Image: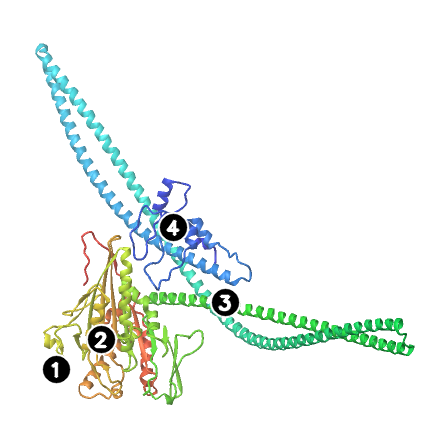
């Protein structure tokens, strides 16, 4: 990348002018950042230190998406410092480098958000300047008209005064002869002339002031023209900055690919390290066994030393006893010599005994020396065993430390991989929104006991990095059919796992977008379970209850920012090409299920589209809701009223298309902003062929009507994929009702539900092919419905 300092947006002319008047040396831009929720901007905010921005803790958007980041302001030096910042960690300190990179990415995200907010402020400043320029021009025109009127009046007065002066002079020339009579009259005329001259002078001064005001107004208009030119130049620079941001997005994609390659290398290194770790563990077990043997030998040697010490002590005691005997015998010899004088024979005998005792003592001394040498050798051997055990322990601790570092590194890389995957999802969603494609998720239900699992699996999932979590393979008659969608959920995915992937899409309804989510698939593939779930079990609740719970929680958290929301719910079903109100209190379909409800209640349910792309059904029951409890009761009422029947595919098969609509109107009292979003959640009827359902009688008519509406939906998808001029939305009430979702400016997501039953592989293949065509359709870029509220407007929902 070139110099990244070129990516910063240029200054606003109005901001440059204000800063130049206040302090020429201050290069900072003081622009109050506003969030997407457009909270009230305060003029007296104090600027936070940049270190506080760097050290702030990151908050999870999943818990509260509306609480994004506080208002921050950045100077040119701070932005350049972030872009030119280099890691200060050591060369091989990957953990510190990663933490620094994560913190650097957080600050860059703050800068990007701040630049986006500055762009919004510039747009608002431009509108304000346009309004002020128009008002100034109107004031200048009014002032010029008033000055012209005054100038004409003054000219008329001056002409009248001149006429009076001329008449007075004529009278004076005629009455010169009569001086005495004309003196008094002449004086009065002079006084009148003086007063007239004074009035003429005052009027002249007023005329000069009016001319100066006109000149000042002309100068002000010229300055406003210059400001308008500077604004046009600033808009051009912002467009260039937007193109630079797009190039940055491409570099981020390339870095994401490099991260995936690094992940592969790390996984390979991890496998080798695991093998090395297993070998080290085997060595550790061998060293522990040898250490135990050495300890046992040490204990035996210690016991032998104790025995030898006991024997040595006994020998010493014997020696002392023999020495005492020798002394006693010597005393006796002396006594005998002195007293009795025994013979020399006895003396020789005693001498022989003494020599034998001395030899015994010398032999015992030799044994003691040998035992001491053995004890020293045993001690040396014990020291060697202790040293080898300590070395083995140090090696084990070192290997344990290396394994722990590798595990920490693996955890960091997995965390980095998760962040990269989240970034990939956000960029992928952004790309899809820019392209206008319909997002498609695929979900495979688990095998049931009656599905015939012994015939072999017909659904598999590729394990390559490109298709992991996005690909599915269907096997029919030994031939594999690969498909790739935006997300694929296997049979182990829970309801929470599915909802996490669409939670941001549901949140868009609160932000003022139209959102549509519909489930498609054959009977028994899990459509109703995905959309409704089982309300009695919280962990098995479907997308509709979870989406409504998230919307109510988010709307309550946004109240702290000044937002107030009003919500209206309606539910209908399309049964045999007839619209039925599932929330109507006058339903009488139990006696005659084939008879249309309009024939019973007298209401005509007609689908209407207004100029703004909103869809309405006349005479449909619309209920104001303010809590999740009210929504739950409405869902239970609608579930009891929906048309179901038994077929060969399912005991409780939905025989109609159900449409749940939640209209959201929000207003912010502080910023005077209004948003209007719509959330459509649709559970389509089964898409299987007539021969598979085995329907007869009324069920046959239902199946024919369902297949006709789904066939019309397929025709619409084909027309959109081929970008034909005419799209047959009016061929079916289902397609006409979905026209804003399929051909408008809404965010649309399709769930294709697949059964892993080998007997249903044909229907599953048709569903996946249809979903692939839907994923290739471009319906337009989503548009947010947000306006600034006029002064006399009121919160209302249509």
In 3D space, how far apart are the residues under numbered discs 1 and 2 (Cα atoms)?
21 Å
Mark 4 or mark 3, which has the lower sequence index?
4
Which residue in the protein does label 3 denote?
408
- Disc number lying in front (1 or 4): 1
Q: Do the residues bearing badges 1 and 2 touch, measured as CB atoms within 8 Å?
A: no
Q: Taking 757 as reference, is 685 left or right?
A: left
Mark 2 or mark 4, which has the lower sequence index?
4
Image: 552 above or below 340: above
Which residue in the protein does label 1 denote?
591
Q: Do the residues bearing badges 4 and 3 touch, measured as CB atoms within 8 Å?
A: no
Which residue in the protein does label 4 denote?
73
Q: Quadrant of residue 168?
A: top left
Mark 1 or mark 4, which has the lower sequence index?
4
Q: Nearer the viewer, residue 602 or 177?
A: 602
Q: Taking 168 as reference, is 721 left or right?
A: right
Residue at 32 percent of width and 76 percent of height: 773
- Disc number lying in front (2 or 3): 3
**Residue 658 shows which numbered tag?**
2
Q: Do the residues bearing badges 2 and 4 touch, measured as CB atoms within 8 Å?
A: no
Quick one: which residue is furthest to the front in this view?
339
In 3D space, how far apart are the residues under numbered discs 2 and 3 (Cα atoms)?
50 Å
Whether residue 485 is visible, yes or no, is no
Q: Taking 360 as reference, is 475 left or right?
A: left
Q: Where is residue 619 shown, x and y percent of the image?
A: 14, 69
In 3D space, how far apart are the residues under numbered discs 4 and 3 (Cα atoms)?
36 Å
Q: Where is residue 722 shown, x and y percent of the image?
A: 31, 74
Label 3 element class: helix
């Amino acid at each position: 990348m070139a110099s990244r300092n070129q990516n910063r947006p240029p200054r606003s002319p109005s901001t440059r002018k204000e800063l130049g008047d206040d302090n020429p040396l201050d290069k900072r831009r003081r622009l109050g950042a506003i969030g997407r929720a457009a909270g009230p901007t305060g003029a007296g905010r104090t600027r936070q230190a940049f270190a506080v921005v760097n050290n702030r803790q990151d908050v999870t958007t999943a818990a509260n998406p509306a609480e994004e980041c506080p208002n921050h302001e950045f100077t040119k030096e701070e932005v350049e410092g972030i872009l030119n910042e280099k890691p200060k960690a050591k060369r091989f300190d990957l953990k510190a480098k990663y933490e620094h990179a994560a913190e650097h990415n957080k600050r860059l995200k703050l800068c990007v958000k701040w630049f986006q907010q500055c762009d919004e402020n510039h747009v608002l400043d431009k509108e304000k300047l346009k309004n002020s320029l128009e008002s100034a021009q109107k004031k200048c025109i009014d002032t010029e008209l008033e000055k012209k009127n005054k100038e004409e009046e003054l000219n008329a007065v001056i002409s009248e005064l001149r006429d009076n002066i001329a008449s007075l002079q004529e009278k004076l020339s005629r009455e010169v002869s009569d001086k005495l009579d004309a003196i008094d009259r002449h004086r009065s005329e002079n006084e009148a002339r003086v007063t007239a001259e004074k009035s003429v002078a005052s009027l002249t001064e007023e005329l000069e002031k009016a001319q100066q005001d006109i000149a000042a107004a002309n100068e002000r208009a010229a300055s406003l023209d210059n400001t308008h030119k500077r604004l046009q130049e600033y808009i051009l620079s912002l467009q260039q900055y937007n193109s630079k941001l797009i190039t940055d997005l491409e570099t981020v994609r390339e870095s994401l690919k490099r991260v995936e390659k690094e992940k592969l290398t790390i996984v390979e290194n991890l496998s080798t390290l695991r093998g090395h770790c297993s070998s080290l563990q085997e060595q550790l077990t061998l060293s522990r066994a040898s250490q135990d043997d050495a300890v046992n030998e040490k204990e035996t040697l210690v016991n032998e030393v104790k025995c030898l010490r006991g024997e040595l002590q006994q020998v010493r005691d014997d020696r002392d006893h023999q020495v005492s005997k020798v002394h006693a015998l010597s005393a006796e010899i002396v006594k005998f010599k002195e007293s009795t004088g025994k013979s020399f024979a006895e003396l020789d005998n005693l001498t022989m005994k003494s020599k034998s005792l001395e030899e015994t003592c010398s032999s015992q001394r030799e044994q003691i020396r040998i035992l001491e040498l053995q004890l020293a050798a045993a001690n040396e051997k014990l020291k060697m065993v202790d040293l080898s055990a300590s070395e083995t322990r140090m090696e084990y601790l070192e290997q344990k430390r290396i394994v722990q570092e590798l595990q920490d590194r693996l955890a960091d890389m997995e965390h980095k991989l998760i962040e990269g995957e989240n970034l990939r999802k956000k960029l992928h969603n952004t790309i899809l929104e820019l392209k206008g494609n319909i997002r498609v998720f695929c979900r495979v239900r688990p095998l049931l006991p009656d599905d015939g699992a012994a015939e072999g699996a017909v659904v598999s999932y590729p394990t390559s990095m490109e298709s992991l979590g996005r690909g599915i393979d269907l096997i029919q008659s030994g031939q594999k059919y690969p498909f790739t969608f935006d997300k694929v959920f296997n049979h182990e995915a829970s309801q929470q796992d599915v909802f996490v992937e669409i939670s941001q899409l549901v949140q868009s309804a609160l932000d003022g977008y139209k959102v549509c989510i519909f489930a498609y698939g054959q009977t028994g593939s899990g459509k109703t379970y995905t959309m409704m779930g089982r309300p009695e079990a919280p962990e098995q609740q479907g997308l509709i209850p979870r989406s409504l719970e998230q919307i109510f929680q988010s709307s309550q958290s946004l109240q702290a920012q000044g937002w107030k929301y009003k919500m209206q719910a309606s539910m209908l079903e399309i049964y045999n090409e007839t619209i039925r109100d599932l929330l109507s209190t006058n339903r009488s379909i139990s006696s005659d299920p084939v008879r249309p409800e309009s024939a019973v209640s007298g209401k005509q349910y007609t689908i209407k589209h207004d100029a703004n792309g909103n869809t309405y059904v006349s005479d449909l029951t619309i209920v104001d809701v303010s809590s999740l409890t009210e929504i739950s009761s409405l869902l239970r009422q609608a579930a009891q009223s929906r048309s179901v029947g038994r077929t060969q595919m399912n005991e409780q098969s939905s025989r109609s298309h159900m449409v749940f609509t939640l209209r959201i109107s929000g207003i912010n009292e502080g910023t005077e902003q209004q948003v209007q979003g719509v959330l459509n959640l649709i559970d389509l009827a089964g898409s299987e062929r007539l021969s598979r359902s085995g329907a007869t009688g009324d069920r046959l008519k239902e199946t024919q009507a369902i297949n006709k509406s789904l066939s019309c939906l397929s025709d619409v998808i084909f027309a959109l994929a081929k970008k034909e001029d005419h799209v047959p939305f009016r061929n079916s009430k289902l397609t006409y009702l979905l026209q804003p979702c399929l051909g408008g400016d809404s965010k649309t997501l399709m769930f294709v539900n697949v059964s892993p039953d080998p007997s249903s592989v044909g229907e599953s293949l048709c569903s996946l092919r249809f979903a692939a065509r839907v994923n290739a359709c471009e319906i337009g870029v989503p548009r947010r419905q947000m306006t600034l509220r006029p002064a006399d407007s009121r919160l209302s929902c249509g």
